[in-house]
Amino acid sequence: MTSQWGARWKVAGVVAVALAASAGLSGCGGDEAKAGDGTFTVGHSEPDHLVPANTTSSYSFDVITELFDNLMTLTEDGKAVPLAAASVTSDDQTVWTIKIRPGQKFHNGEPVTAQSFADAWNNAAYGPNAMGANDYFSSIKGYADLNPEDEDAKPKAKTLSGVEVTGADSLKVTLDAPFSQFPLLLTYPAFAPMPAAGLKDQKAFDEHPIGNGPYEMDGNWERNKQIKLVAAPGYTGPRKPKNKGVTWKSYSNADTAYTDLRAGRIDVLQTIPSAKVPEAKRLLGDRFMTRTMSTTDYLGFPVFDKRFDNPDLRKAISMVIDRQGINKAVYNGDYFPADSLLPSIIPGHRDNACGELCTYDPAKAKQLFDKAGGFKGTLELYFSNAQPTFAQWMRIVANSLRDNLGITDIQFRQVPASDYFSMLRERKEKGPYRQNWEADFPSPQNYLENMWGSVGNRMGWTSKKFDDLIAQANRTADQQQALALYNQAEDIAIQEMPMIPLWTWAGQGGRSKNVDHVTITPYSTGLVATEVTVK
């Protein structure tokens, strides 16, 4: 989930997506899942933050989307509809009028007003606050004044000139340019409101968020253990929980999480480790859950490091990755090898857009590698510990690099999931790194601008032609014309290959006998906790 029009760095991803809401888990096993009290337990990886605008991690979104109601939410088919908003409208796609549904309250009793949103957005967009999702607000007029290009310069303003409170329940938002997908952007967790109490002490708020959503905190965040939520008694919105609460249990190992699911110590696991999938299908039966996903894995390059600034080197590495072979060896043949920068469920996906550059061809890869002058020194490969499969496929890639390109000095850098995206944001990586993206909303812009756009991408890659095409597509009201422009931009990114598309995930989760009506979306919202029923 970051770009001028959205979040670039999820887990996903959050999007997130990486960043992804259905990204892997791992662990610290624990107590038996509660039975009979109307609550249920979900396993996932440890979040990094719970302040909505200070994260782009899907692990954090798991919790945040239950604590907060955004102005808009996504339907199952990816359409934006009002949630905390009564309406979001515009005549020119530049100036937007937002009416907020009256009568809403935060969990501490504070009223939810237009000011609650304006204050939260200004806090997120103000550069010195260093919020993780700061770039999500870059489409709003006045953003540049809060984020000077010179990091040592003082911002010219503390609030976004494009955000105007026009009444207790109304906002006027002016963008720098027309953007027809602004309502979709408002579904992203970073745009959640914050109460005055949270803005006064954000460190305390991170430990005990005070939201306006269907669940509220039950005690503080128990770091590296669990986050307990209970149904909020004063909630008046449309997402009324069909259960009494949900506990998000943190794991540092996906296999441990799966073991706990089998034993009934947790009730839902959004992603079962691939090595366990054949067994899970057999043991869980109809409780094994498959779903379409938008989460795609990539291998990014630190182009800011001169050793990686030759496109032929990057193309060679792409062509020496056996996507089909890795899919069979690591993912039981269930994943979908990438042939485009976009997953197939996103409008604008074109079959085989990547062509030979995403096709395993060691001989041609070696020709490109030699043309680029080879690679000298240690090649470091970065990935998180969120899923054991990350290390498995990285080892296969390393073997191919050794065998086919002659790169012998390769080192693995496995980083804790909770620290991984902070490392990438700070550009501390010294070699190719695993990146993933899970759709914030179903648009090619959400992938292309957020991950390849020159403003804030992790690679340090820039292309004026790419940026100009994205900007033109963003201004184009006709959907088909916009898709054609996004595709032209995609072609530029493919030919430069600063980030290699690898494969799109297959959604493979499971539930215990204790719960029913478990739905997991392909977007950053992930599990729809409110719909889960407890037997």
Image (tube, rainbow, N blue to C red):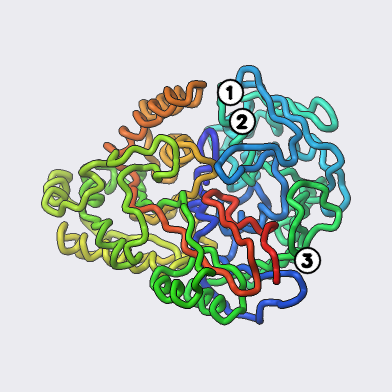
Residue under label 2, please give it: 143
- At numbered mark 2, what does the secondary structure look like: helix, strand or loop? helix
Residue under label 1, please give it: 176
Look at the numbered discs 2 and 1 and tell me whether their residues touch, using CB distance below 8 Å: yes
Q: Is residue 21 left or right of residue 325?
A: right
Instruction: Say whether disc 3 or disc 1 marks the residue closer to the N-terminus.
Output: 1
Measure the C-alpha gap from mark 3 to mark 2: 36 Å
Number of other residues with Cα within 10 Å of mark 2, as a class: few under 14, some 14 to 19, many 20 or more: many
Number of other residues with Cα within 10 Å of mark 1, as a class: few under 14, some 14 to 19, many 20 or more: some
- At numbered mark 3, what does the secondary structure look like: helix, strand or loop? loop
Q: Is residue 6 left or right of residue 125?
A: left
Quadrant hosting residue 74: top right
The residue shown at (75%, 76%) is 36
The amino acid marked with disc number 1 is Asp
Residue under label 3, please give it: 218
Is the residue 405 above or below the residue 150 in the image? below
* Residue 147 drawn at (x, y percent): 59, 34
Measure the C-alpha gap from mark 2 to mark 1: 9 Å
